[in-house]
Amino acid sequence: MASGFTWIREAMLAGGLVVLVLISMWVATGSFPPMVVVESGSMMHTEEGSVGAIDPGDLVLVMNPDRVEIVTFVEATEEGNENFGYETHGMAGDVIIYQKNGGSDTPVIHRALLKAVANDSGGWDVPGTTLLNVDSITWTLDYQCPYHGGTYDLMIDRWVPPHEGYLTTGDNEDTNGCKIDQLRATNPDASEQYIRGNGLKDENGNPVQAVKDEWVVGVASTEIPWLGAAKLFFSGTSSSVTDTTWRSLAVVIAVIIAAPYILETVMERLRPPSDEEE
């Protein structure tokens, strides 16, 4: 009977610890839930994933956007800018979590490239560039795009923003990169059919527009690699998780299981012998 009460007590202590950790993270980030599990490979930097980048199966702490000032890629790469050299998750600028066109489907976690800000005179400003009060935005970013064995720099071309907001993209150069979320900003002459067929769309099938401030639900903070893969496995959404992540998760689980036994063995050896043992 006593062993049953002991089990219940330990379970309650474990549950209380989990609740305490979640509350602490909520207070620290200002967001609830305070973390998200990454499902897609759109932010990967290498084929098998890497610590420091955002890979499928990673847990990412989410900061409340009201608590931080979002730094865009162009601000972080423009010499002389106060944010020059700022990096998160392996590249310049912040990674934001946003709802596509303010909708209710799964949020996107992508890097903020630049922000179009309405000028009081009717034009557009782009912080981190020399563009002030322009009718349309044309700007070449220090962002390399692979092309037929060579590279070129990503160019925003004659883009007329429909409203204030961010241009965004995933870091994965094979699937995203220079194919930004707001495809019209780099393809002003493309047909509507092309944009709808190739660009990122919301749950209603509409092309994703510049990300308004109110559509940003968080800013990506600390990455906790691998641990979210278990959640994706049980939810049936683990198709993008790499073999490296599964192996790393298995090692973590093995260490967690073995740690109490190892610690107990070490403590037993360090414990001085009792008088009875002598």
Image (cartoon, grey):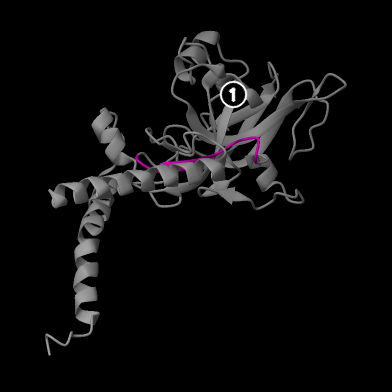
Which contiguous range is marked in magenta? 57-67
- Secondary structure, mark 1, is helix
Relative depth, front residue between 249 and 118: 249
Among the 4 quarters of the image, the one containing residue 218: top right
View extreme (front): residue:
1
Relative depth, front residue between 22 and 258: 22
* Residue at screen point 24% across, 68% down: 263
On screen, residue 51 versus residue 138, left or right, reads left
On screen, residue 213 versus residue 127, left or right, reads left
Q: x, y (%) of residue 163?
A: 70, 18
On screen, residue 68 versus residue 36, left or right, reads right
Question: Which residue is identified by label 1?
Answer: 215
* Residue at screen point 42% across, 32% down: 175
User: Can residue 54 be seen?
Assistant: no
Among the 4 quarters of the image, the one containing residue 188: top right
Q: x, y (%) of residue 143?
A: 58, 41
* Residue at screen point 24% across, 59% down: 255
Q: x, y (%) of residue 88?
A: 55, 48
